[in-house]
Image (cartoon, helix red, strand yellow):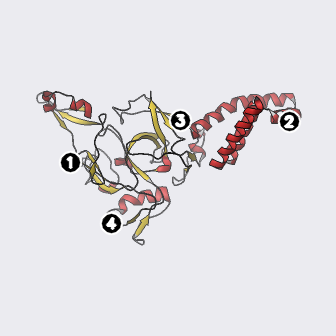
Amino acid sequence: MKKIVYTLGLLVILLFYFWTKELIITGVLLIILDSLTTCFWVKILRNSISDKVFKILRICWYFITPIVISIFIRSFFIDMYFVPSKSMERTLYPGDYVIVNKFSYGVKLPRHKRNIPVIGGMFQAPKHEYDLYRSLKGGKRFQREDIVVFKAVDDSDKFLIKRIIGMPGDKLKIVNGVVIINNQKLPNKDNYSFNYISNEVKNVTMIKNLSEKEFRESSTREKSYFTKNIKVKSDFSYFLFPRSKQDYWTIDNYGSLIVPKKGLSIELTKENIQIYKTIALKFENVELEDYSQKYYSFKKDYYFMLGDNRHNSIDSRSFGFVPEDFIQGKMEFSF
């Protein structure tokens, strides 16, 4: 029976190697498979060293193996993340945990030790951001309004949970809180929420956060007290991307801009170079400081993320586009 398990495991590991081309990981998996089945190399090792040394190595192996398996599962298949803020209310709440599918949407293999699950915190952060992950081909593609987990683009070690709104190549803008994609309004889901100004109490102005469903199901009398808190003029209460638009855009009236797409060539102008020069340098290692090149072709796909709690979310309106290789996977469920 063990030989059958070993043979099947060997075939799976070989397929894994052809998929990933990761020799070291494949070697570790072969060692673990052998130790759990035939113990061929274990027997050779036991006959080559003293019993005392072998016992020490065996104890170390029992300690290391669960860590290795945990790293493997969290890197290639599924991972769990904690929701720290209210930026996704009413979909997710602070204290929730989300399970993320990494395998189906293309595994992002970390190129730097700092980004390895479980043990990454033991190492120093990388010096640059343009090659943090190597993407493996997945069977599915991300879709608009998928909820995903991605590494923060602000040089921190945080992972954020947001909803994909802008896809690569989209022309996007927000007008009075309404998202417009390629000149088409994107309908709000029932659980998208906004701040409303409430005048229910005389001479007292209050802010109340309501989802689309909660507002729709309010009575006519209650609705008469509520006015959606749309920001028309910038009040600097929310830092915007790019900073050059801080005086002109708001979280409710934003854009328009084009979400970068791999191979998409854009003409560089005085206006848009402020939007794209940061990501070109940070994620593609290209400087766009002048107009020596009239056009620029992007090397990666990018996405525009928004939180479901639109007036209480730090998202792409603040930190900009997210490269696809930063996206760890799609949320499958929460608890």
Kindly identify which residue carries mark 1.
232
Q: Which of 59 and 220 is in front in this view?
A: 220
Mark 3 burial class by Cα count in 10 Å: few <14, some 14-19, many 20+ = many
Element type where label 3 sits in the image: strand
Can you say whether 253 is above or below 32 in the image?
below
Q: In which quarter of the image is the C terminus?
A: top left
Earlier along the polypeptide chain: callout 4 or callout 1?
A: 1
> Tag 2 or tag 1, which sits nearer the N-term?
2
- Residue with the mark numbered 2: 44
> Gap in Å between the C-alphas at discs 1 and 2?
74 Å
Q: Earlier in the sequence, mark 4 or mark 2?
A: 2
Q: Residue furthest bottom?
A: 292
Q: Of the numbered discs in the image, which one, if any, rests on residue 79?
A: 3
Q: Mark 4 points at which residue?
A: 270
Q: Which of 271 and 258 is in front in this view?
A: 258
Q: How far apart are marks 3 and 1 (CA)?
A: 40 Å
Dot 2 falls on a residue whose secondary structure is: helix
Q: Position of residue 57 (x, y in %)?
A: 78, 32
**Which mark is first along the chain, 1 or 3?**
3
Nearer to us of marks 1 and 2 is 2
What's under tag 3, amino acid-wise? Answer: Asp
The kind of residue tagged 1 is Val
Q: Which residue is drawn at 31% across and 34% down?
A: 191
Q: Which amino acid does label 2 sit on?
A: Ile
Q: How far apart are marks 4 and 1 (CA)?
A: 24 Å
Q: Distance between the residues labelled 3 and 4?
A: 42 Å
Whichever of labels 2 and 3 marks the residue nearer the N terminus, that label is 2
